Amino acid sequence: MTARLRISADDQEGVLQRVIFEFSRRNISIEKLIFTRGGSPCTISVDVMSDADAMRVVKSIKKIQGVLYAEHQLEGCEPHAGTPQTRREMNPQEMLG
Amino acid sequence: MRGAKLLVNTLAEHGVRTIFGIPGGANLAIYDEIGASSITHVLTRHEGGAAHMADGYARVSGRPGICLGTSGPGATNMITGVATAYLDSSPVVCLTGQVSTKMMGNDAFQESNTFDMMIPVTKSNFKVRFPEEIPYLVGKAFAVAVSGRFGPVAIDIPSDTVANELSGEPHLSSTTVTAPSDLSNLQPAVSMLNAAQRPAILVGGGAKWARCGEAVLELAELLGAPVVSTVMGKGAVREDHPLAMGTTGMHGRRSSALVLDEADVVLAIATRFSDRTTGKTGEFLTKTGIIHVDIDNAEIGKNVKNIVGITGNCGEIIELLKNSVDRNTERRTEWMTRIMAARSFCQCDFDINESPLKPQKVISQLSKMLPDDAIITTDVGQHQMFAAHFFEVRGHRRFITSGGLGTMGFGLPSAIGAKVAEPGAKVICLTGDGGFQMTFGEFATAVENRIPVFVVVMNNASLGMIRQFQKQFYGNHIFAADYGRSPDFVKFAESMGGEGVVVEKAGEVAEAIRRGLASDVPFVADMKLDINEDCLPMTPPWAGRNGTIYGRCKWKDVNDGQIKNFGR
Ligand SMILES: Cc1ncc(C[n+]2csc(CCOP(=O)(O)OP(=O)(O)O)c2C)c(N)n1
Ligand SMILES: [Mg+2]
């Protein structure tokens, strides 16, 4: 099951890249992405693997300069983002840096 | 008027007095205009140095620091500095030359895709398309850099947009960027603080940007709450205050960890709860009510769950809390006694005047001798963590460090930027022999531009932190950590027109510091340290508090039973 984020943003240079980079920054893989422009604002719809992933990224997407709106539909999810994937089951030496 | 003049005029209108940078083919038109303007230019030895200088300038002044490089390598050289500023929320405005718009996209000479490369390390970035939009974009860049959570902004400037005359009216900017706030949890937070038996405050780096340290201490006094800081938050509150506990985290104080462990409510101000602060997450504030105040809503709930979040300017929120919480120190006398006992117990258990020279000696001597308005910048490694642990940021002292990205080479250039921002203050760069060698070309910049910074090289002939990790966690396999040879740092300084002194014994430290502080040229004190002195205490990230390696820390002999009776 995938989760979807709907984003609308000013059609300014770099906004699409910034949105995409925010997913890789948070270590979340994109399953599907639709970008539509045609006058401002542009819309970006992104599917990710889980609600937890979508929730983890939605606030940082909202704060991107130029993003006007970002939303993830919550359906029976925990009220807070889960522990990032990267924190689980780590070998001690991984944790030094 | 040509674009370059419009750019330089616009920068001056935004209050820019100094630019740190290096020219190249793609930004020469801009240089031509800077030369004819009232703006001072500091010619650095590497663009990375320019970015760190702009960062140091911003951290001291609270205003945007400006760096300028050419296209291609000039721009890529600045990326580490911009990324450093990004993780520590510093408002650097980074200007890069770019090849002409007529050539872009063809892999022209010194063309790099700077615009895309800057995206992940900036808050926002822009590409100039035609000269008329320069004032608009510069205005926007400045507004974004210092709105909400501060951060770096980059502007990529193709050569034709600055080399050519304007053909129309400039586009002006009236941009104001507002950061959303959410105070809906203010009342629940007040109730939590009022009901708390053992409140504590944790301050992060954002409290420094908000310059709300005094208000935090006033709130702490009202509540009877100890104030613990993260490494980035060090210096937000003056550490000579009886409620200031010093730093927590991987190399923090046991007493700080203790008060956080025992607190029933923690008010966390402007911290991202980095893994270096929390350590083993399963043991961090598990039974504590957490109120998290941050200007960046995306931080709330990111690393620590189940918090009561308040989004907004932390200075304003602290004022609101101060006006709403009950004065409750009487009810918390027992807690206060325990805090004071823990605080005063925190000491080293050895003679710091031992030979070979110990880093603790140097830091404690600096702590004693630096003026109360001194600025100390650090590099990254053992010396940085020793300073975070032992140096006392009292009075109006400032502590500037690369806590987020942990960038070696940050110390010297950021000190130069700091000194430019506040020429009247004594600026001390505490660096390692490794970190110093990464950017020590900037020592020449300091000499040439008469920026007398005092460089204290904590010379342990090694990448000390790496050596320590290899000793402790890689079966003592020390590899690629020791320097077979390093330059003679004093001769190096002298060759550039600076001065210096070698220090080998504890008894020589004070005189070296006295000379360094008095010098009117950049000065190096080469402190030859014990290579074997590890930076302890240290709590490895997986270990939890029972796994702390104490070293010479007095807490090493204290068992759980004794801790229970502490101050009781
Ligand atoms: C640019 C960069 N490269 C590598 C590292 C990894 N690193 C962290 S601390 C350290 C050793 C620093 O050595 P030195 O500057 O001599 O300081 P010391 O630990 O000896 O006090 C290294 C290599 C880093 N933080 N930054
Ligand atoms: Mg070293």
Image (tube, coloured by chain):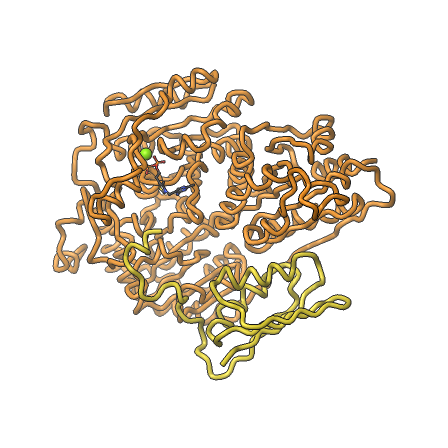
Compared to residue A30, the image places residue B234 above or below, namely above
On the image, the x and y values in percent for residue B555 come to 18, 49
Q: Which quadrant would residue B388 be assigned to in this image?
A: top left
Query: Residue B263 in the image: x percent, y percent?
Result: 30, 63
Residue B291 percent across, percent down from the top left:
42, 65
Viewer-side residue, B290 vs A10: A10
B361 horizontally vs B443: left or right: left
* Colour seen for chain B: orange
Q: Which of B118 and B308 is in front in this view?
A: B118
Q: Residue at horizontal 61%, vertical 49%?
A: B145
On the image, which quarter does residue A69 sit in? bottom right
- Residue at figure coordinates x 41%, y 59% from the top left: B268
Q: Which quadrant holds the N terminus of chain B?
A: top right
Residue B330 vs B523, above or below: the answer is below
> Who is closer to the viewer here, B184 or B390?
B390
* Chain letter of the yellow region: A
Percent from the top left, x then y, of residue B504?
A: 25, 22
Q: In this view, does B438 lie above or below A53?
A: above
Left or right position of B230 against A64: left
